[in-house]
Structure formats: C-alpha cells, structure tokens
Image (tube, rainbow, N blue to C red):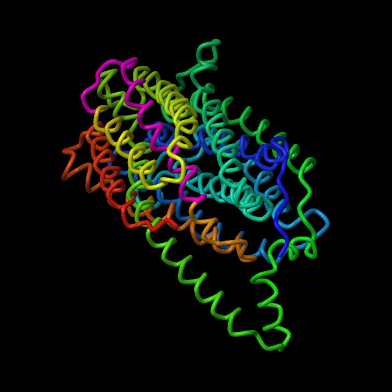
C-alpha cells in the first residue's frame, strides 16, 4: 500500500474551507432555535422537545450519507456531490425557517398542543438539520480519505479553526444587525428582522464557501484511492470475486474490527456526557441569561430579545476560547487522555459558574472556559477514531455510525430536559447549565476508559 502524500497547508485548508459556511448555518441554528420557538409561543418546559429533531435527523442521515458516498464514484467526486446537494437544501430552508411567524399560519392549537406556526417551524427545522448533516459529514470523510496519519491531526485542527470561525460569525450576526439599526423586536409570534437577515446572509455565505471547495478540491478516482487504501479494499475485492482470502488478511481484518469497536464504544461513552451537556447549553442559555441578567422570562419582552442577542455574543466568546485552547492542546503531545480530561474539567467549571453570575459581561469568563471543552470535543474524538480506522475503505460508513455517539446523547438529553427542568432544577433554566457542568465532570471520568496506543 502506498503512503498518502503530504499536502500543503492550503491543500488542507481547501479541503475543509466549505466547513466555514456550513458551521455558520449550524451556529445560527444552535443560537436561535430556542429563541425562535419561544417567540412562536413554546413553553420553556417544551423547548427541549424541539431539540430532538436535529440529532434525530443526524443519526438517520449521516450513516446513510457515509454508506452511499463510500459507493459513489462519479466525475464530481465521491463525497462532494452530497456536500453540494446538502448545501443547496440548507440555503432554501435558511430562507424559509425564520419566516415561520410571518406567513399568516394559524396560532390556534392544531396538533399535539402545537400551533400551525410551530408545526411549520418544526418541519423547517427538520429539513435544515437534515441538510446541514448532509453537507457537514463529507468534510470529515474527505480528511479521512485523503490525508495521511501524520497530517490528520493538523487537518482536523484546521477544520476545528474554520468551525469556530464560522460559529463566531453566525453567533454574532443578530447582535451586529441590531447594533446597526435593524429591528430586534417584532409583533408577538413574529421573528425579529435581526434574526431573519442573519439567516439570509448565512445562507449566502454557505453556498459561496461550498462552491469554493468544490472548485478547489479534486477527490481521488477509484484506482488512485485503492493504491492508498488497498490493505482492506484488496481483501474485500478478492472475497467478492470468489478468490480465497489469506489467513493473515482475515486475522488483520478481525483485529482491526475489534480495535475499531473498542475505540467506538469508549469514545462514545465520553461523547454521551459531553453532547448531553452542550444540548442543555443550546436549549436553556437564552432563558438562563434572560432570567439571571435581565430578570425576565417573558419571550415577548424586549429584555428577552436583548438577552437572546447576548446569547450569540457569549457563544462567540466560547468560540474564541475554543480557538485559543485548540492551540494549547498540541502541547500535551501524544497524551490525548490528559488533554481530554483537563479540557472537559475546565469546561465543567465554566458551566457551573454561570449559575452564580448576574452580570452579562462577567459571563465572558465561564464561556471562555466552556470553549476549552468544545475545542477538545471537535478535535480529539475524530483524531482518535480515524487513526483506529487505519485507512479502511468504509471510512464514510464508520464515521456516519460514529456520529450516532453525537446524536443519541442529544436525543436522550432532549427527552429528559423537561423532567429535569421541572423536578431537579425546579423550573430554573440557569440550574440546567449547572447540570451541564456535572455532565462534563462525568465525561472527564469516562476518558479513562479510552485505550490509546
């Protein structure tokens, strides 16, 4: 098997640049979904249920994208066709979703306690997250396909940087548009113009970034791909053609499968607690900041909308903290577990601290700390897992399945969110962020189960 060639910095950059645009869309969704549905009339105890759709769609879509893209070979590439299709759908939905309250749909309950407006918003959210997942997964797969083990950490670090840069922009859009004079309040049940224009601009940047990547990146054709990944591919080809497979090949495949399964499960345990914690951050931060710093829980009030804008600011601070910490993680060398544990504990401290802060500017400190955990979550799991894959030609399928370790905990957290808010947090949304801190502490303990060669 030939060794994958080293790529230049700009080669690695181009491979992931479209991720910048995709992440703007994801950041707009993360920072504004609770705000949008609260504005449309959702009760705080219902908010977590609206967050079930994004991870549920990711859990369904990403393994399918991985499976089918593993088998796709066309003139446009292997992963890029899915990237482009996902981006086009996302752009259409980003124009549709923020207008849910402006279409004259019924405000009466029509199904499961939801109004027509909220049902339209739910349908739009389902399409948005599906398309984001379709567009996002190919970037991770292309790094696994085309980058050698020596440069893989660097490639995912670049992807992490672009992810955080896109998040920073997406989080700040509503605040910036409000600052330049675009209205941040609207009639009851209608999304403010500051949010609507944020989604419009995000959609434009997304499609431009994806076009750039599709023009700059040329995926390897099947023959060249096989030259760099023929250890397992050749064995599978021999088996499918009826030729005998050697005992050493079978032993190698069995050993690799066991290693991949062990890595999958142990990292998955850590992922469970991490992503449950961040699900509660995305769901309850708007209400928590409005309650602690603005003294209101009324989604129709100007104070709540100001607090919702501030959510974008503190999430941007979190992204800055993540970028800074991402430059420190490599200083841990190959001690991945120590880097993971320290990062998650710092993030846990940040989450717990938010409960006691009532000044909007002091929130910058805990969210900088939360960014440290986010940096580790973006870089370390995929580095560890793709290294365990060792050039497996089913990289896309495995990465799609690995995404379930991100989606499943969010679904569980969303299902339990209302019960925790009622019975544990006593209706306090700031307390839900404290619970997120406890979950990150459990994640840091779980890191000890990961075995790193």
Q: Is residue 385 left or right of residue 79?
A: left
Q: Is residue 162 left or right of residue 122?
A: right
The answer to which quarter of the image holds residue 23 is top right
In the foreground, 47 or 386 = 386
Count of numbered labels shown in the rendering: 0
Is residue 192 placed above or below 348 in the rendered structure?
A: above
**Which residue occupies the extreme right position in the image?**
75
Taking the magenta stretch, the answer to whether it contains residue 115 is no
Taking the magenta stretch, the answer to whether it contains residue 358 is yes
Is residue 136 placed above or below 298 in the rendered structure?
A: below
Question: Residue at 26% of width from left, 43% of height from top?
Answer: 441
Question: Residue at 35% of width from left, 56% of height from top?
Answer: 269
Question: Residue at 56% of width from left, 50% of height from top?
Answer: 133
Is residue 132 placed above or below 353 in the rendered structure?
A: below
Q: What percent of the width, then of the height, locates residue 226?
A: 74, 65
In the foreground, 321 or 432 = 321
The answer to which quarter of the image holds residue 19 is top right
Main secondary structure found in the magenta portion: helix
In the foreground, 185 or 426 = 426
Q: What percent of the width, then of the height, locates residue 25?
A: 57, 36
Task: Name the quadrant of the N terminus.
Answer: bottom right
Q: What percent of the width, then of the height, locates residue 155?
A: 61, 42
Is residue 339 placed above or below 386 in the rendered structure?
A: above
Q: What percent of the width, then of the height, locates residue 173?
A: 54, 23
Question: Residue at 52% of width from left, 70% of height from top?
Answer: 256
Task: Name the quadrant of the C terminus.
Answer: bottom left
The answer to which quarter of the image holds residue 297 is top left
Q: Is residue 288 left or right of residue 247?
A: left
Q: Which residues are magenta?
A: 355-383
């Amino acid at each position: 098997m030939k060794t994958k060639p080293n790529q230049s910095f700009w080669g690695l950059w181009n491979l992931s640049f479209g991720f910048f645009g995709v992440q703007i869309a994801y950041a707009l969704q993360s920072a504004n979904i609770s705000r949008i549905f609260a504005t449309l009339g959702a009760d705080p105890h219902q908010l977590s249920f609206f967050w079930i759709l994004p991870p549920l769609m990711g859990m369904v879509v990403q393994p399918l994208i991985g499976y089918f893209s593993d088998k796709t070979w066309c003139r446009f590439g292997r992963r890029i066709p899915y990237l482009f299709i996902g981006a086009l759908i996302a752009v259409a939905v980003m124009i549709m979703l923020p207008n849910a309250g402006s279409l004259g749909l019924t405000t009466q309950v029509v199904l499961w306690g939801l109004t027509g407006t909220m049902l339209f918003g739910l349908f739009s959210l389902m399409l948005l997250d599906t398309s984001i997942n379709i567009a996002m997964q190919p970037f991770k797969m292309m790094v696994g396909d085309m980058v050698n083990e020596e440069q893989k950490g660097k490639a995912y670090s670049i992807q992490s940087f672009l992810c955080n840069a896109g998040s920073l922009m997406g989080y700040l859009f509503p605040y910036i548009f409000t600052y330049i004079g675009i209205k941040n309040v609207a009639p009851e049940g209608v999304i403010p113009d500051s949010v609507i224009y944020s989604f419009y601009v995000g959609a434009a940047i997304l499609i431009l970034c994806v076009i750039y990547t599709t023009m700059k990146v040329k995926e390897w054709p099947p023959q060249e791909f096989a030259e760099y990944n023929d250890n397992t591919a050749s064995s599978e080809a021999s088996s499918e053609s009826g030729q005998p497979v050697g005992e050493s090949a079978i032993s190698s495949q069995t050993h690799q499968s066991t290693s991949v399964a062990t890595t999958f499960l142990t990292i998955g345990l850590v992922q469970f607690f991490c992503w449950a914690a961040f699900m509660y951050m995305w769901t309850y931060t708007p209400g928590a900041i409005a309650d602690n710093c603005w003294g209101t829980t009324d989604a129709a009030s100007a104070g709540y909308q100001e607090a919702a804008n501030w959510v974008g600011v503190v999430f941007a601070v979190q992204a800055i903290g993540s970028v800074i910490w991402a430059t420190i993680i490599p200083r841990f060398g190959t001690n991945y577990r120590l880097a993971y544990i320290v990062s998650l504990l710092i993030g846990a401290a940040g989450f717990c601290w938010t409960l006691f802060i009532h000044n909007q500017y002091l929130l910058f400190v805990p969210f900088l700390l939360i960014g440290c955990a986010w940096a580790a979550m973006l870089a370390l799991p995929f580095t560890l897992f793709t290294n365990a894959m060792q050039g497996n030609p089913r990289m896309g399928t495995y990465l799609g399945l690995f995404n379930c370790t991100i989606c499943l905990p969010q679904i569980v957290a969303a299902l339990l969110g209302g019960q925790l808010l009622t019975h544990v947090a006593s209706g306090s949304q700031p307390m839900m962020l404290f619970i997120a801190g406890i979950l990150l502490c459990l994640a840091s303990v779980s890191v000890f189960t990961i075995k790193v060669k």
